[in-house]
Image (tube, rainbow, N blue to C red):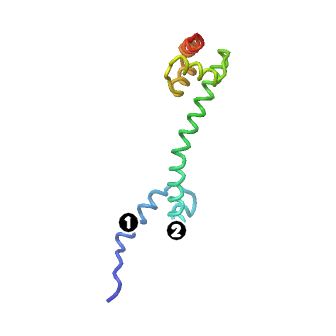
């Protein structure tokens, strides 16, 4: 008796991956082995870069806080130390937003931290 292959399921599985590789260049889009490898590598990049995104945003917030703090005559590390000593629990995301969009509020926080 001949071997039975479930061609419907295997073709559906391949079509699913090839649909996900639409928009890729050349053979990466329509050659099964190349497309599968490219798609799998893309998943690895996506996993890695979800972690790197957090790292990059934290670095951006620190740069923005540092720039605004230096306008007030403090370095980033001195400001963060003063905020901790003053008991002001505010994360870097909020501080960076205040520094960019509400400089007067950021200035008030800095003066409160300096005085404490």
Q: Quadrant of the N terminus?
A: bottom left
For label 2, the SS is: helix
Residue 79: horizontal and vertical position, in percent?
A: 61, 20
The residue most toward the bottom is: 1
Residue nearer the viewer, 77 or 55: 77
**Where is 65 relative to 27, above or below?**
above
Which image quarter: residue 92? top right
**Residue at numbered disc 1:** 12
**Where is 29 relative to 5, above or below?**
above
Residue 2: horizontal and vertical position, in percent?
A: 34, 87
For label 1, the SS is: helix
Tell me which residue sits at (36%, 78%) in the image.
5
Label drawn at residue 31: none
**Residue at numbered disc 2:** 33
Residue nearer the viewer, 101 or 24: 101
Tell me which residue sits at (54%, 46%) in the image.
49
Residue 24: horizontal and vertical position, in percent?
A: 54, 56
Tell me which residue sits at (60%, 29%) in the image.
62
Q: Quadrant of the C terminus?
A: top right
Residue nearer the viewer, 60 or 40: 60
Tell me which residue sits at (52%, 68%) in the image.
33
Cα–Cα gap, marks 2 and 1:
15 Å
Category of crowding for the residue at label 1, using alpha-carbon neighbours closer than 10 angstroms: few (below 14), some (14–19), many (at least 20): few
Q: Is residue 73 left or right of residue 56?
A: right
Q: Is residue 55 left or right of residue 13?
A: right
Mark toward the start of the polypeptide (2 vs 1): 1
């Amino acid at each position: 008796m001949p071997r039975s292959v479930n061609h419907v399921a295997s073709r559906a599985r391949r079509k699913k991956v090839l649909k996900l590789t639409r928009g890729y260049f050349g053979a990466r889009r329509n050659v099964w082995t190349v497309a599968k490898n490219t798609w799998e590598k893309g998943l690895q990049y996506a996993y890695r870069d979800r972690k790197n995104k957090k790292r990059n945003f934290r670095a951006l917030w620190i740069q923005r806080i540092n720039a605004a703090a230096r306008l007030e005559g403090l370095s980033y590390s001195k400001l963060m130390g003063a905020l901790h000593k003053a008991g002001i629990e505010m994360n870097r995301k909020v501080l960076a937003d205040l520094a960019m969009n509400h400089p007067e509020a950021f200035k008030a926080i800095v003066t409160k931290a300096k005085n404490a």
